[in-house]
Amino acid sequence: MKKHFLSSLLLLGCGFSVYAVQEGSPIPGCPAVLPGNSEKLNFDAYTGKVLLVDFWATWCPPCKKSMPFLNGLRNEYLKKDFEVVAINVDENTEEALRFLKAHPVDYITAFDPTGECPRVFEVQAMPSSYLVDRQGKVRMVHLGYRDEDQEGIRKQVDALLGE
């Protein structure tokens, strides 16, 4: 019995520690659509920039709380080749658009109402952020958001911009 419990615990722990997108892996493509047309998000367009990809939804309070920080970070580092791209995963894109109209941000938001992008990334929490270097490799995976996270995220961005 104890052997089965420990095996199950080990497997459960492994399941939560393994992401499809890990630090050091290339950022995968996903079929999120840009607003106003049917053009798909293309991460290759950001090669040469440091990129923060953020998954969010209107039903997620920490997601909404992170948006002013991400917007300020984006604007602070914009001239240093840094960009934020958000991927909204609400099933109702119109609801997300209404939210963004009431709470505008300066960064690009793409929409994935089918949930394909979170499946590709194997998103484990909302919000989930992926910091990507200039060569398109994921260098940090950050789950959730608290105000206390800001300093650590900023340090990671600074480090990548300094490379």
Image (spheres, rainbow, N blue to C red):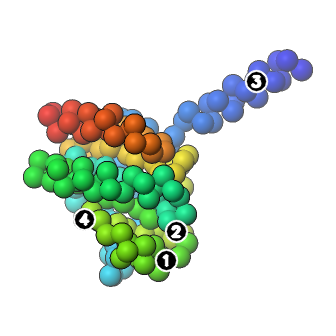
Instruction: Say which mark, if any, is on residue 90.
Output: 2
Residue for badge 1? 95
In the rendered image, the vertical position of residue 146 relative to residue 120, given as above or below? above
In the rendered image, the vertical position of residue 51 relative to residue 150, given as above or below? below
- Kindly check if marks 3 and 1 are in contact, taking CB atoms under 8 A apart as contact: no
Q: Residues within 10 Å of mark 3 (few under 14, many from 20)?
A: few
Q: In this rendering, which labeled residue sits more in front, label 3 or label 1? A: 1
Amino acid of disc 2: Asp
Q: Residue 41 vs residue 4: left or right?
A: left
Mark before the other along the chain sequence, 4 or 1: 1
Q: Secondary structure at mark 4?
A: loop
Q: Secondary structure at mark 2?
A: loop
Q: CA distance from mark 4 to mark 3?
A: 47 Å
Mark before the other along the chain sequence, 3 or 2: 3
Q: Secondary structure at mark 1?
A: helix
Q: Residue 30 vs residue 50: left or right?
A: right
User: Among all residues in the image, which is located at the extreme left?
Assistant: 79
User: Which quarter of the image is occupied by the C terminus?
Assistant: top left
Residue for badge 3? 7
In the rendered image, the vertical position of residue 108 relative to residue 92, given as above or below? above
Residue for badge 4? 106
Total number of numbered discs in the rendering: 4
Q: CA distance from mark 3 to mark 1?
A: 43 Å
Q: CA distance from mark 4 to mark 1?
A: 18 Å
Amino acid of disc 1: Glu
Give residue 76's position: percent from left, percent from top. 17, 50
Instruction: Say which mark, if any, is on residue 38.
Output: none
Mark before the other along the chain sequence, 3 or 1: 3
